[in-house]
Every structure is written in structure tokens, then in C-alpha cells.
């Protein structure tokens, strides 16, 4: 390995009609690293991650995985490479239980007897995933709509991890959660790195970003305007990068 990056985005451009959502964006993710990706509403955070997850295609630019260029034309391509995204709206089935959600779209349509066996297997594997990630859900047969917001977020993360990914992209995983639940999701995020997973963590909550990230990238109006080592920056500096024009920042420094 030469540069230690598991993922490199180079010169990414994306427009929607006349709207330029991403302009010449670069981003590097190290092995085992957690990156925080921040920016005001409509900065382009979700769009950038959707390009990596195969939901969108970039107009221009390169994606490298382990230093080799890869083509990610759809979510299947991303999954094959080892990239999973946990979307902001979670994409869980509220009226199904935890195993059904963890294995959604992967249950085989087999004969009744085998279906019964598979169901038992799914439950066993689900318990295993919950246990491995120390996710606190006592009864996996609970329907997802009966779980708390934090538990639902954990199920969505567990589902991503069940594909054995190398990279997990998390889009606002702590939005709309109670304080105690936020802490649990942050702990779960940190725990994923123990399973050899590198993470890009999108959030508008800077406290959360500072808690989990090693480095912080700042998008503004489609431009990547800053990247900082967490230990060498502070919230004030990040907020400035998020909201101020370059001229404004320069005039402040004089
Ligand atoms: N599918 C789409 N069609 C048209 N415009 C889009 C689409 N997805 C995102 N955009 C636009 O791209 C810009 C960036 O959006 P997004 O990546 O969702 O920002 P963020 O996640 O930082 O809030 C916004 O102006 C948004 O309206
Ligand atoms: Mg978004």
C-alpha cells in the first residue's frame, strides 16, 4: 500500500440541470479513519455520498478504492466493492421485525419448510449482529415501528454492517434523536472502526462530528472549502469555513 487511503475522490463534478451541486471536489479517506463531512443545507453532502454509494453518477471525476480506479454505476457496484450507505431516511420497513429488516431483499423465496429454517437462521444471525455491535435490542422480534429512533438507527447501521463492508457512509445519523440516543449512536459509530470499517459521517451537529471524527471536511455551495485534523481545529474555525466567504475570512485574519 502506498498512500494508505482506502477511498479517494478526485475532481468530482455533479450538476442537476443548471444547478451545480458539486464542483471539483476531492476527498480522501484513510484505512480505519472516521471523516466528518459538514456543510450548510444544500452544500452537496448527500449528493457526494450518493455518488460513492452508486445512487448518483458523477458528471466528471474519479473514484479510487485501495488506490485503484473503480466504476460505481449503481448501488450493487458499491456493495460489491465494500461500500454501504445508511440513508437519512433509514429505508427500514416499519411493520417488519428486526431480522426481516436486517435481511430485507435477501430472503429466498423457497419452499415452506426451508423458509421456516431460513427464518430461524435469520433470527440467529440477527442476534449475532446485534451482539457483535453491542446494539441494545432485547427482543429482535419487535416490529421496527415499536423501537426508539436510536434503536432504528442502530438497525439500519447493523443492516449495512451485515454486508461486511469496508466503508460505511452515514448521512445525518444523529438527526432527530434524543440526547441519550445520540450518545449510543456515536458509540456505535466509533465501535465500527474496531471491525475494520472506515466511515464518512455527515452531520450538521458539530458536537457529534468532533466526538467521532479524525478529520473534518467542509463543503460549501458545492466546493470543498476546508479539511482539518480534528485535533488541530475547533468549532469556531469549522463554522467560519461553513458559512463565511473567503474574503470575509481573510479580512478577519488581518
Ligand atoms: N435529485 C436531485 N435533483 C435535483 N436537485 C438535487 C437533487 N439532489 C440534490 N439536489 C440539489 O443539489 C444541491 C445539494 O443537495 P444535497 O447534496 O442534498 O445537500 P446537503 O446534503 O448538503 O444538504 C441542493 O441544491 C439540492 O437541491
Ligand atoms: Mg443531505
Image (cartoon, rainbow, N blue to C red):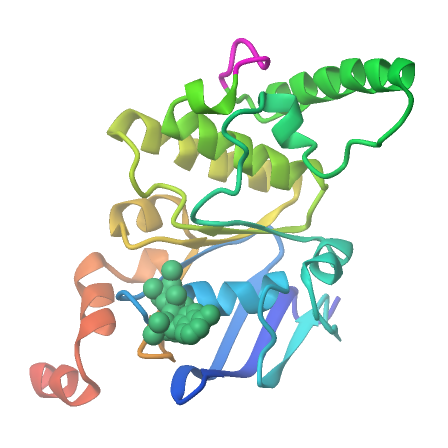
Q: Quadrant of residue 101?
A: top right
Question: Does the segment drawn in magenta span residue 137?
Answer: yes
Q: Main secondary structure of the magenta part?
A: loop
Q: How many marks?
A: 0
Query: Which quarter shows the C terminus?
Result: bottom left
Q: Foreground residue, 85 or 246?
A: 85
Q: Is residue 227 left or right of residue 233?
A: right
Expressed as whole percent of the image width and height from the top left, the position of residue 203 reads 34, 53
Asked if 234 appears above or below 184 in the picture, the reply is: below
Q: Which residue is rendered at x = 53% and y = 36% of the image? A: 92
Q: Which residue is rendered at x = 59% and y = 65% of the image? A: 52
Q: Is residue 115 left or right of residue 34?
A: right
Q: Residue furthest top?
A: 138
Q: Quadrant of residue 73?
A: bottom right
Asked if 144 appears above or below 172 in the picture, the reply is: above
Question: Does the segment drawn in magenta span residue 67?
Answer: no
Camera sees residue 227 = no
Camera sees residue 173 = yes
Q: Is residue 85 left or right of residue 178?
A: right
Query: Which quarter shows the N terminus?
Result: bottom right
Expressed as whole percent of the image width and height from the top left, the position of residue 142 reads 53, 14
Q: Is residue 132 left or right of residue 12?
A: right
Q: Quadrant of ligand 2?
A: bottom left
Expressed as whole percent of the image width and height from the top left, the position of residue 214 reads 43, 54
Expressed as whole percent of the image width and height from the top left, the position of residue 4 reads 65, 64
Q: Foreground residue, 182 or 59?
A: 59
User: What span is in magenta?
Assistant: 136-142
Q: Which residue is rendered at x = 60% and y = 84% of the image? A: 61
Q: Which residue is rendered at x = 39% and y = 29% of the image? A: 150
Amino acid at each position: 500500500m502506498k498512500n494508505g487511503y482506502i477511498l479517494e475522490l478526485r475532481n468530482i463534478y455533479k450538476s442537476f440541470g443548471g444547478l451545480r451541486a458539486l464542483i471539483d471536489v476531492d476527498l480522501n479517506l484513510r484505512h480505519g479513519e472516521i471523516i466528518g463531512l459538514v456543510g450548510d443545507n444544500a452544500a452537496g453532502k448527500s449528493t457526494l455520498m450518493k455518488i460513492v454509494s452508486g445512487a448518483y453518477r458523477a458528471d466528471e471525476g474519479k473514484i479510487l478504492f485501495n488506490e485503484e480506479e473503480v466504476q460505481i454505476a449503481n448501488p450493487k457496484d458499491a456493495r460489491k466493492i465494500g461500500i454501504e450507505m445508511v440513508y437519512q431516511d433509514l429505508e427500514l420497513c416499519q411493520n417488519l421485525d428486526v431480522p426481516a429488516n436486517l435481511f430485507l431483499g435477501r430472503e429466498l423465496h423457497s419452499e415452506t419448510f426451508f423458509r421456516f429454517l431460513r427464518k430461524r437462521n435469520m433470527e440467529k444471525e440477527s442476534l449475532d449482529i446485534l451482539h457483535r455491535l453491542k446494539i441494545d435490542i432485547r427482543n429482535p422480534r419487535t416490529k421496527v415501528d415499536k423501537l426508539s429512533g436510536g434503536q432504528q438507527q442502530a438497525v439500519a447501521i447493523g443492516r449495512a454492517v451485515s454486508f461486511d463492508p469496508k466503508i460505511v457512509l452515514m448521512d445525518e445519523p444523529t438527526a432527530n434523536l434524543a440526547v441519550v440516543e445520540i450518545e449510543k449512536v456515536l458509540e456505535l459509530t466509533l465501535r465500527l472502526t474496531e471491525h475494520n470499517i472506515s466511515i464518512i459521517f455527515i452531520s450538521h451537529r458539530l458536537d457529534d462530528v468532533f466526538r467521532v471524527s479524525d478529520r473534518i471536511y467542509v463543503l460549501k455551495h458545492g466546493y470543498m472549502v476546508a479539511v482539518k485534523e480534528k485535533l488541530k481545529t475547533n468549532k469556531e474555525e469549522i463554522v467560519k469555513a461553513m458559512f463565511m466567504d473567503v474574503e470575509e475570512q481573510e479580512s478577519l485574519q488581518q
